[in-house]
Amino acid sequence: MADALCPTEYSDHLSRMILDQIADKWSILIIAALCSGPMRFNGLKRELNGVTQKALTQTLRRLERLGLIERRVFPVSPVAVEYSVTPLGESLKAPFQAIFQWSVAHGPEIEAAKQRFDRERDGA
């Protein structure tokens, strides 16, 4: 039996595929925004400073396909669409918060390492 810290080839492939789908900049920010409550497309676009309409559309579709968010269409005129996080998507809240807290706690160290690397590289 494979040790939890030593993944099998199958679990490693599956983990890589899933991480490839959810660990990009916009996916994390979209899920984080929707954990606060349902939002419409333009609300998300305003919340996510710098996201293009194309990137937002593609990411929302991908997250919906993965079962992490839900798209709800309201039969009004004009049609209203609202996005919300599913229970599966909600389960990512704690890991994403941990990553955010880690980045805040270690941000100065990362910046110092980048500056040190750049100085050494420029001096070579």
Image (cartoon, rainbow, N blue to C red):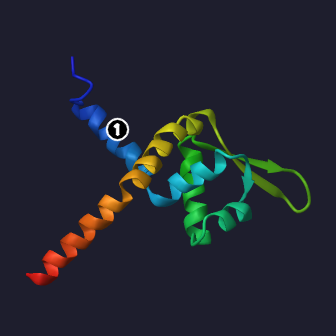
Q: Name the one closer to the observer, 55 or 65.
A: 55
- Given the image, on which type of amino acid does mark 1 rest? Leu
Q: Name the one closer to the observer, 29 or 84.
A: 29
Determine whether, in the image, residue 52 is placed left or right of residue 99: right
Determine whether, in the image, residue 76 is placed left or right of residue 83: right
Q: Quadrant of residue 118?
A: bottom left
Where residue 92 appears, x then y in whole percent?
51, 39
Where residue 63 appears, x then y in whole percent?
55, 49
Q: Name the one closer to the observer, 101 or 2.
A: 101
Where residue 42 appears, x then y in whole percent?
73, 65
Residue count near mark 1 (Cα–Cα under 10 Å), binned few <14, some 14–19, many ≥20: few
Compared with 11, 108 (above or below) is: below
Screen quadrant of the C terminus: bottom left
Screen quadrant of the N terminus: top left
Q: Residue at x 55, y 66 (%)?
A: 55
Q: Residue at x 26, y 69 (%)?
A: 114
Where residue 75 appears, x then y in whole percent?
88, 51
Q: Residue at x 57, y 42 (%)?
A: 68
Identify the residue under disc 1: 14
**Name of the residue lying farthest toward the left:** 124
Determine whether, in the image, residue 28 is placed left or right of residue 83: left
**Name of the residue lying farthest toward the bottom:** 123
Q: Secondary structure at mark 1?
A: helix
**Name of the residue lying farthest toward the top:** 1
**What is the count of numbered marks?**
1
Compared with 13, 32 (above or below) is: below
Q: Residue at x 27, y 33 (%)?
A: 10
Q: Name the one closer to the observer, 107 or 88.
A: 107
Determine whether, in the image, residue 66 is placed left or right of residue 103: right
